[in-house]
Structures are given as structure tokens and as C-alpha cells.
Amino acid sequence: MRYFQLLAGGAAKDIFKTVRHLVSLTVLMLLLFTGVASAADHSQMRAAVTLLESAKESLRKPRTALDPPEKSDPLPLLLAAKRAVEEAPPIYLGRKKPILESIDLAIAEVRTGDRARKAREHIDHAAKIIRNGVQEFK
């Protein structure tokens, strides 16, 4: 009986106040960590876009003897972009598959010697899917 009298007084208010603060803090922490995780996820995909753009730029320039190999050969850049997409967290649901397919097609075009239009089209397509996904998940 004495316990219920204590709860009816100020102790019950303190308990509810503490519970309310804990719930608020938990919700705030969840929102904070969700935002940090999504920013990290986007950084992987943004890095892939940067690599794709560098590969596309190297396709436009004719090779010269003075060009360093990493600047003139798009293949290592395309492989690095593919690796970045593969390692990105799965927040993009079904978007990784068409991105990887486009990158694979661009790699195949570069390996067969077609360093022009078709490879750039595949790179553009992959970059477009990534940009749309990053915008959608912001």
C-alpha cells in the first residue's frame, strides 16, 4: 500500500519523466546514426562516379608517350569504379546490378580496342544510375 502512495506522489512523475527522456534520446541517436551511415554510403558511390568520369576523360584524349599510364589507360579506373560499387553498402537495392553491367560492358569495349563512343555510352549510363540513386536517397 505504501508503494502505491509513493508512486501517486512525485516518484511516478520522475519515473515517467526519465522514461520520456530516454525514449527521446534513443530516437535522436537513431536519427543521427542513420544520417551518418547514409553519408558514408554515398561517399562510396560518389567515388565510383569520379573514377568513371576519369575513365571517360582518358578515353577522349589520344595517348602520347608523355602521358603517365594511370592517366591514359581507362581500364584500371573502370576496375576501381567496379570495385567501389561492389563494396558499397546495399542501400541501393536493385541498382547495383545495372551499374555493374554497364561498367562490365565498358570494360569489354576497352579490352577489345574500341576506346571511343560505345565505352563512353556505357560509362555515362552507369554514372547516371549512380547519380539518380544518390539524389533519391539523400
Image (spheres, grey):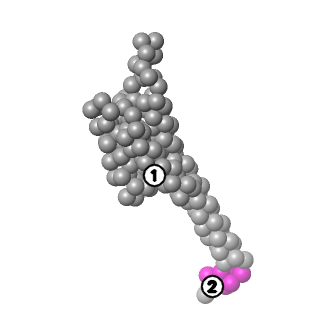
Numbered range of the magenta stretch: 3-9
For this orientation, the residue located farthest to the bottom is 1
Q: What kind of secondary structure does the magenta stretch mostly adopt?
A: helix
CA–CA distance between discs 2 and 1? 62 Å
Residue 120's quadrant in the figure?
top left
- Residue 128 in sight from this viewpoint: yes
Q: Is residue 128 left or right of residue 78?
A: right
For this orientation, the residue located farthest to the front is 117
- Residue 41 in sight from this viewpoint: no
- Numbered disc 2: secondary structure: helix
For this orientation, the residue located farthest to the left is 112
Q: Nearer the viewer, mark 2 or mark 1?
A: 1
Please state which of residues 122 and 33 is positioned toward the viewer in this rendering: 122
Q: Position of residue 135 (x, y in %)?
A: 55, 54
Q: Residue at position x 41%, y 43% from top?
A: 121
Q: 99 above or below 5? A: above
Residue kind at label 1, given as amino acid type: Ile
Q: Position of residue 95 (x, y in %)?
A: 40, 55
Give the residue number, with chain letter if any, for mark 1: 129
